Image: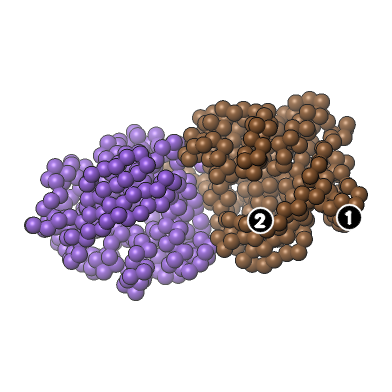
Chain colours: A purple, B brown
Amino acid sequence: MNILVVGTVAFDAIETPFGKTDKIIGGAATYISLAASYFVKPINIISVIGDDFPSEDLLRFKNMGLNLDGLQIKKNEKSFFWSGKYRNDMNTRDTLKTELNVLADFNPIVPEKLKDCDYLMLGNLTPSVQQKVISQLIKRPKLIVMDTMNFWMDTAKEELLKVIAQVDVLTINDEEARQLSGDFSLVSAAKKILGMGPRFLVIKKGEHGALLFHKNDIFYAPALPLEEVFDPTGAGDTFAGGFIGYLAKKNDITFENMKRALIYGSALASFCVEKFGPEKLFDLSDKLITARVSEFINLSQFEMDYFG
Amino acid sequence: MNILVVGTVAFDAIETPFGKTDKIIGGAATYISLAASYFVKPINIISVIGDDFPSEDLLRFKNMGLNLDGLQIKKNEKSFFWSGKYRNDMNTRDTLKTELNVLADFNPIVPEKLKDCDYLMLGNLTPSVQQKVISQLIKRPKLIVMDTMNFWMDTAKEELLKVIAQVDVLTINDEEARQLSGDFSLVSAAKKILGMGPRFLVIKKGEHGALLFHKNDIFYAPALPLEEVFDPTGAGDTFAGGFIGYLAKKNDITFENMKRALIYGSALASFCVEKFGPEKLFDLSDKLITARVSEFINLSQFEMDYFG
């Protein structure tokens, strides 16, 4: 099964209580694609960068099995840039700078060969760009997973709701679920959001794990308690990449398999935060991932004996 | 196995976004004992009340299998009273009033017949009172579980640490674990706290579940996502009561059994929040509890197939 990923490929500058980076590579599509590359190949990226993006990093992407045929490189333009600073709790961050650059008038073009994608991952981006990608496909993908954020709820609600109505799985965080639904209770929020179109909803709660909602079923995947979170940037995208990667590998989109996919996504995310930027995602192996998944099993699984 | 519970039996007045109560019965020992009563009987309470405490409520306690021989009733004195108001998120609350009354000079006396207790639950109280109870026992209980709160860390740290050094399981919330250890990471905090004496540490995270730490093992019990949390008062105590109740019933204090005890504690807590005060805890049954535990199994258990 192939995966098409649309999202940003960009520069980030990050400051955490542990240190500070210069411009390093980042972007939703970067994290999603690297994480997914441990499950299926190729991962086809639809994105845009300027000619300031280092060619050696593009080579590293290719070596990871990412197909860059849908990555537009704009001459004499600059790549999207975000800089932010994490507070001491590592859960909240302040945006210091956002330079849209090439993203300002991004018109995604899906190459002919990539138009019959099996699994589509819509990374967090302008809903209209997400829509344009869906519209270019020659068949309905087996599964569409969509990530978004509060910014689009504030500025492009109508377009956002149109895209949400077309996807199978929506992934947002708890605050975004509350904002989108207007309900404080996540159970009530989930019911409303499932009524907007998606058959599945993943609510990401950062260090508190993630919830999967489908009809009346709920599954909870814990986050691994970590001694040190070095840099949370990209953890949500990495989670989504591991999630859709595992689903595509198994080509199984049942609720039971989504539970496992949530655990794999959480495992990949737990690696991501160990280093600045996406660096850790270049250095994993099936063996490391399996070992990490075992830690999740130890963390959350138990043998029940019955009461009475 | 018998359980000895020390803690408050008191009045609360509670205000939540859903409503407001007059003085209703409450107190740590009340919630703990009612929850534990579904597992073993009798539950022996060490506490103190004034003669303003309704005799019909004492009768209801007795009907639930609570032994009140260690409950002092002070003539012409008033019971401990707390009132508080929950904010809209239901996770934070402001104390409106605290009247110590009988608690001000509480000198716990363990009746002779109760001095050979098997399982001891030290509910949140002045550390010196917790200490006095331990000191009166004729043998070391098989298991001592202790709950405490930030207030004692601020006002009686030295005495608190002495009691902590004598217990097997400490239950505190995440902010208290951070305060007690001085570490933000819960993993690092847990290591330090386990170094203070307890072999097991339970960190309660409210709607985000609870973590059990023992040596290098971690187990995570989720909280049940609820559509409505009516009144969170006593949820932590109810959790502790279900936890020690299940352990005593099975008379098994291995890490494996503690995992199950955490799930039972969480199940009892999920009932507690459905009504104001401890009311719901009078109306449960083995059948209801087993059904609720099944919901936790559905919520968190999965079949893993391996990667690669």
Q: Residue at the far top: name it.
A: B139
Q: Which mark is residue B195?
A: none
* Amino acid of disc 1: Ser
Chain ID of residue with mark 1: B
| Cα distance in 3D space between marks 2 and 1 | 27 Å
Residue B118 percent location from the top left of the image:
76, 31
The answer to whether residue A136 is seen in the rendering is yes
How packed mark 2 is, by other alpha carbons closer than 10 Å (few <14, some 14-19, many 20 or more), is: few
Nearest the camera: B53 or B118? B53
Residue B201 horizontal side relative to residue B146, left or right? left
Circle 1 residue: B55
Q: Quadrant of the C terminus of chain A?
A: top right
- SS at circle 2: strand
The structure residue drawn at horizontal position 79% and vertical position 25%, both measured from the top left corner, is B139
Q: Amino acid at mark 2?
A: Thr
Please identify the residue farthest to the right as the structure is shown. B75
Which of the two discs, 2 and 1, sits closer to the camera? 2
Residue sticking out furthest to the bottom: A158
Q: Is residue A215 above or below residue B43?
A: below
| Residue sitting at x 38%, y 36% | A290
Image location (x, y in percent) of residue A21: 26, 43
The circle drawn on residue B95 is: 2
Chain for mark 2?
A: B
Q: Is residue A305 left or right of residue B126?
A: left
Q: Are marks 2 and 1 on the same chain?
A: yes
The answer, for residue A251, to whether it is visible in the render is: no
Residue B161, x across and y down, in percent? 64, 31
* Figure disc tally: 2
Would you say B215 lies left or right of B105 here? left
Name the residue nearer the viewer: B115 or B289: B115
Outermost residue on the left side: it is: A75
Circles 2, 1 touching at the beta carbon (< 8 Å): no
